[in-house]
């Protein structure tokens, strides 16, 4: 496990490009003294640019009530974390855009660990992430532990599906295929292939830190568990799909009240990842909840959500 922690710590502490750093500092100030950490992840981190993209952040806070300053929003965030917001800021004469998820330290630790049934957090943070801000060394340590646990949780739950020997590439392509299928996402489940192949050496390294390879075949891993394990794991993943998509739908409805500009963001993301183009009228934008529900079914029918 210490090897995995070292890998994650190196990723988490790697400097990010100036626009992302500036936005993280803006978020730390926006959410005040209760901000424990600001974590940067997603396509902008992978590509080291935000050009034509939207930055992705998690702001991890001590108390939702203090961070959000709205008891209703804080209650929703506690009941169904995280709350998601759209923020903009000016930087070097241009507008930066970001999707910002806010949740408590405890919710982040629970969501990345083995006790979390649905994959929303542990699958997301099985991918590389940067801790741009941590309030102190103890918070940084807890965040690195959580990111390491997210990788382990994803790997173990995906590794249990295999009935024969597998490689790191096999493992992580299957992991992202299953986790994408357990959410309502505009990207194809095959997006995982691109993610893994873009950073294969990294996924090979974290796999070697979690599983023991066959002695006569380096980089090859035997099936995990007994002969009944794959069937049990597959049944669990089917149930995870139902639960995950149900919770995603609930979060989308909640986001209609918390995510300013959320419809525009969702439509842009659906178009970028799936090619399904949706034009919103001003009337539709004024009723985000009803519009969101109508678009959900329309886009599902046209293949924009999986």
Image (tube, rainbow, N blue to C red):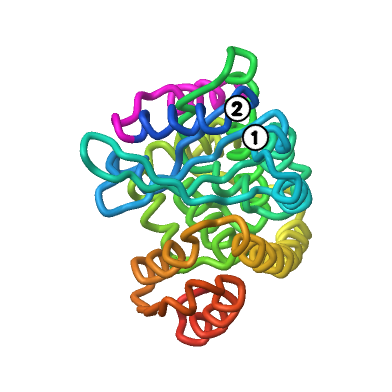
Identify the residue at the far top of this view: 137
Residue designated by label 1: 67
Residue 154 placement (x, y as % from top left): 62, 46
Residue designated by label 2: 35
Q: Are marks 1 and 2 in contact (CB under 8 Å)?
A: yes
Q: Is residue 13 magenta?
A: yes
Residue at 51%, 37% (x, y): give it: 216
Residue 204: mark: none
Mark 2 packing: few (<14 Cα in 10 Å), some, or many (20+)? many
Identify the residue at the far left of this view: 93
Q: Which residues are magenta?
A: 1-19
Give the overall secondary structure of the magenta segment: helix
How far separated are the C-alphas under marks 1 and 2?
7 Å
Residue at 41%, 79% (x, y): give it: 281
Vertical side of 83 occupied by 40: above or below: above
Residue 297 placement (x, y as % from top left): 57, 83
The N terminus: image quadrant:
top right
Judged from the image, the secondary structure of the residue bearing numbered disc 1 is helix
Asked where in the image residue 137 lies, by quadrant, the reply is top right
Q: Tell which tag, 1 or 2, sits nearer the viewer.
A: 1
């Amino acid at each position: 496990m210490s090897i995995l922690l070292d890998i994650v710590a190196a990723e988490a502490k790697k400097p990010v490009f100036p626009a992302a750093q500036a936005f993280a500092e803006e978020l730390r100030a926006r959410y005040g003294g209760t901000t424990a950490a600001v974590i940067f992840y997603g396509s902008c981190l992978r590509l080291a640019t935000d050009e034509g993209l939207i930055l992705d952040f998690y702001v991890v806070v001590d108390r939702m009530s203090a961070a959000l300053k709205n008891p209703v929003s804080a209650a929703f965030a506690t009941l169904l974390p995280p709350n998601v917001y759209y923020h903009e800021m000016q930087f070097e004469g241009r507008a930066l855009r970001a999707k910002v998820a806010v949740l408590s330290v405890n919710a982040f630790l629970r969501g990345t660990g083995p006790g979390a049934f649905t994959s929303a957090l542990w699958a997301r943070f099985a991918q590389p992430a940067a801790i741009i801000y941590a309030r102190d060394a103890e918070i940084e340590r807890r965040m690195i532990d959580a990111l390491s646990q997210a990788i382990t949780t994803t790997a173990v739950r995906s590794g249990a599906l295999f009935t024969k020997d597998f490689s790191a590439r096999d493992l992580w392509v299957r992991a992202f295929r299953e986790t994408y299928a357990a959410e309502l996402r505009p990207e194809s489940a095959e997006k995982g292939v691109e993610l893994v192949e873009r950073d294969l050496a990294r996924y090979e390294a974290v796999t070697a830190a979690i599983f023991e390879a066959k002695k006569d075949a380096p980089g090859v891993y035997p099936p995990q568990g007994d002969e009944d394990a794959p069937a049990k794991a597959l049944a669990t993943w089917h149930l995870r799909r139902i639960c995950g998509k149900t919770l995603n739908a609930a979060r989308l409805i909640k986001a209609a009240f918390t995510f300013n500009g959320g419809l525009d963001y969702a439509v842009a993301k659906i178009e970028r990842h799936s090619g399904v183009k949706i034009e919103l009228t001003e009337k539709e934008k004024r009723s985000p909840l009803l519009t969101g529900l109508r678009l959900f079914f329309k886009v599902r029918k046209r293949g924009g959500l999986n």
